[in-house]
C-alpha cells in the first residue's frame, strides 16, 4: 500500500515489508453466505439449486442419472470436486443402490479427470456426515475429492492459513470437463 493509499485510508497500517495476498471471496464462506437456513431443500440448499443452473454457471463438471459432480465454491485445493446425489438426503445409509453406484462411478471418473487435467499425485476422498463431523452442509450428502500434490501443504496454509489457487474456478471446470472420461457403464 502506498503512502497515498494510507492517507486515503486512515488506520490502514504501517509498511511492514510483507506482501499481502487478499482472498476476499473467502469472506462469503466465513460469513456463511449461501448456507442453507434449515434441513429442507427449500431452505436454500445449494446442492438442490445447482443442478437447475447451466453447467458453467453452477460449476457442474459432469451429470449422471442420480448424482452429479460439481466444483467446490470454497476449495481446499484447486480442482476440489464434490459428488452429490440429486436427491436431498443427508445420510449415506439413506441412499439407494443406484445412487451409491453412481456416486462411486463419478468419484472414479473425477479422480481420472483430475489426474489427466492437473497431474494430481494423490487424493483425499471422503464424506463428513453430520455437522459434528465437519459437514458444512450437513443436510445434503456430498463426497469430497481433493487433489493433492507434493509440497501443496507449505507455509501458506500451515502458517498463513491461506490457500493459493492458480486459476479461476471456471477455468478449472473447463479443464476437468475436457478431461472427464466417458461413462462406459
Image (tube, helix red, strand yellow):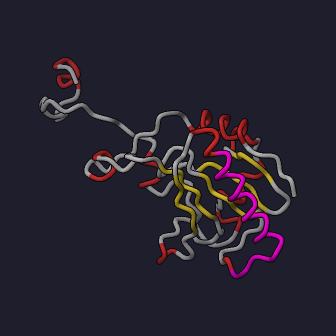
Q: Position of residue 81 (x, y in %)?
A: 61, 52
Q: Quadrant of residue 56?
A: top right
In the rendered view of the protein, which quadrant contains the N terminus? top left
Q: Is residue 183 left or right of residue 175?
A: right
Give the residue displayed 35% in from the left and 46% down from the top. 162
Give the residue displayed 77% in from the left and 61% down from the top. 67
Give the residue displayed 48% in from the left and 48% down from the top. 77
Q: Position of residue 177 (x, y in %)?
A: 72, 39
Q: How many marks?
A: 0
Q: Quadrant of residue 101?
A: bottom right
Give the residue displayed 56% in from the left and 54% down from the top. 34
Seen as rendered, the residue at the extreme top is: 4
In the rendered view of the protein, which quadrant contains the C terminus? bottom right
| 123 versus 182 height, above or below | below
Q: Main secondary structure of the magenta part?
A: helix
Seen as rendered, the residue at the extreme bottom is: 93
User: Is residue 106 on the magenta stretch?
Assistant: yes
Q: Is residue 32 left or right of residue 172?
A: left
User: Is residue 101 on the magenta stretch?
Assistant: yes
Q: Is residue 1 left or right of residue 62?
A: left
Residue interval drawn in magenta: 93-113
Q: Position of residue 62 (x, y in %)?
A: 75, 48
Q: Is residue 55 left or right of residue 18?
A: right
Q: Position of residue 23 (x, y in %)?
A: 39, 40
Amino acid at each position: 500500500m502506498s503512502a497515498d493509499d494510507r492517507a486515503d485510508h486512515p488506520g490502514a497500517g504501517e509498511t511492514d515489508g510483507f506482501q499481502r495476498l487478499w482472498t476476499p471471496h473467502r469472506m462469503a464462506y466465513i460469513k456463511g453466505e449461501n448456507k442453507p437456513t434449515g434441513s429442507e431443500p427449500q431452505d436454500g440448499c445449494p446442492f438442490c439449486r445447482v443442478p437447475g443452473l447451466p453447467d458453467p454457471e453452477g460449476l457442474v463438471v459432469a451429470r449422471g442419472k442420480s448424482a452429479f459432480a460439481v466444483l467446490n465454491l470454497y476449495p481446499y485445493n484447486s480442482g476440489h470436486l464434490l459428488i452429490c446425489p440429486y436427491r436431498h438426503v443427508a445420510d449415506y445409509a439413506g441412499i439407494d443402490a443406484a445412487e451409491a453406484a453412481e456416486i462411486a462411478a463419478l468419484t472414479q471418473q473425477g479422480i481420472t479427470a483430475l489426474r489427466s487435467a492437473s497431474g494430481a499425485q494423490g487424493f483425499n476422498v471422503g464424506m463428513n456426515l453430520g455437522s459434528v463431523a465437519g459437514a458444512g452442509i450437513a443436510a445434503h450428502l456430498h463426497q469430497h475429492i481433493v487433489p493433492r500434490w507434493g509440497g501443496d501443504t507449505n507455509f501458506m496454509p500451515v502458517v498463513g492459513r491461506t490457500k493459493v489457487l492458480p486459476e479461476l474456478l471456471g477455468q478449472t471446470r473447463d479443464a476437468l470437463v475436457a478431461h472427464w472420461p466417458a461413462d462406459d457403464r
